[in-house]
Image: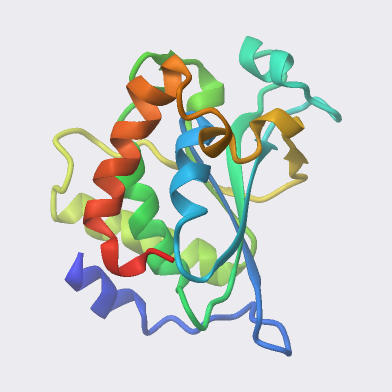
Amino acid sequence: MSEIIKMTTIIPESNINDSNTTEIATLAGGCFWCIEGAFSQVQGIHSANSGYMGGISTSPTYEEVCSGESGHAEVVQLTYDPTVISYQEILEIFFTLHDPTQLNRQGNDIGSQYRSAIFYHNKHQQNTAQQIMKEMSSAEMFEHEIVTQICTADIFHAGEQYHQDYFNNNPESQYCQAVVSPKLAKFRKTFVNKLK
């Protein structure tokens, strides 16, 4: 990914607020418990909230999202400090946390709610996402074609309270032991210098 860093960091941050403190990123990469669990450990991430985006229901519930009827994806919305971690670095982490070549699934989690998607909040984020995906495809970093969607962010619906900080609150659950814990262990090894 070193070439990605060299090529995409020349794009200026375009949505940094006047106090230069925080920005928003919204990502979908399968079950939100994995994505949230990883990003909550990263330097520069102020919050990582599990929720839903990209569907038709105006107030989706977890049950509706799981049924596939609402059209939403499980997402994690990050509030981050761009002076500590760039949007590009966030996407680089994101692409190691899931398989972006699986359409509407991640492993045994199947359905459009588990799709891979980047919901951009400004032109800079859109350009960065497109550039990184182009570079990964050119470098043939994955055996199959990347199917991650790049979409305009819309309304973020916060997930139910029991979904927030799920891994830390439920480390012994069967799903966390079988799926989340191994992913987070690999993540911590790969990004040890980025951890809080």
Q: Relative to residue 65, is residue 4 drawn left or right? A: left
Q: Relative to residue 154, is residue 31 drawn left or right? A: left
Q: Position of residue 79 (x, y in %)?
A: 63, 63
Residue at figure coordinates x 74%, y 44% from the top left: 156
Return the residue found at the far top: 67
The quadrant where residue 194 appears: bottom left
Compared with 66, 125 (above or below) is: below
Residue at figure coordinates x 52%, y 53% from the top left: 40
Q: Position of residue 80 (x, y in %)?
A: 58, 68
Return the residue found at the far bottom: 18
Residue at figure coordinates x 19%, y 33% from the top left: 144
Return the residue found at the far right: 58
Compared with 70, 12 (above or below) is: below
Q: Relative to residue 2, is residue 12 drawn left or right? A: right
**Quadrant housing the C terminus:** bottom left
The chosen color scheme is rainbow
Q: Position of residue 28 (x, y in %)?
A: 52, 40
Q: Position of residue 21 (x, y in %)?
A: 66, 81
Closest to the observer, 108 or 164: 164
| Residue 121 appears in the picture as rendered | yes
Q: Relative to residue 16, is residue 187 drawn left or right? A: left
The total number of labels drawn is: 0
Closest to the observer, 19 or 176: 176
**Quadrant housing the N terminus:** bottom left
| Residue 104 appears in the picture as rendered | no
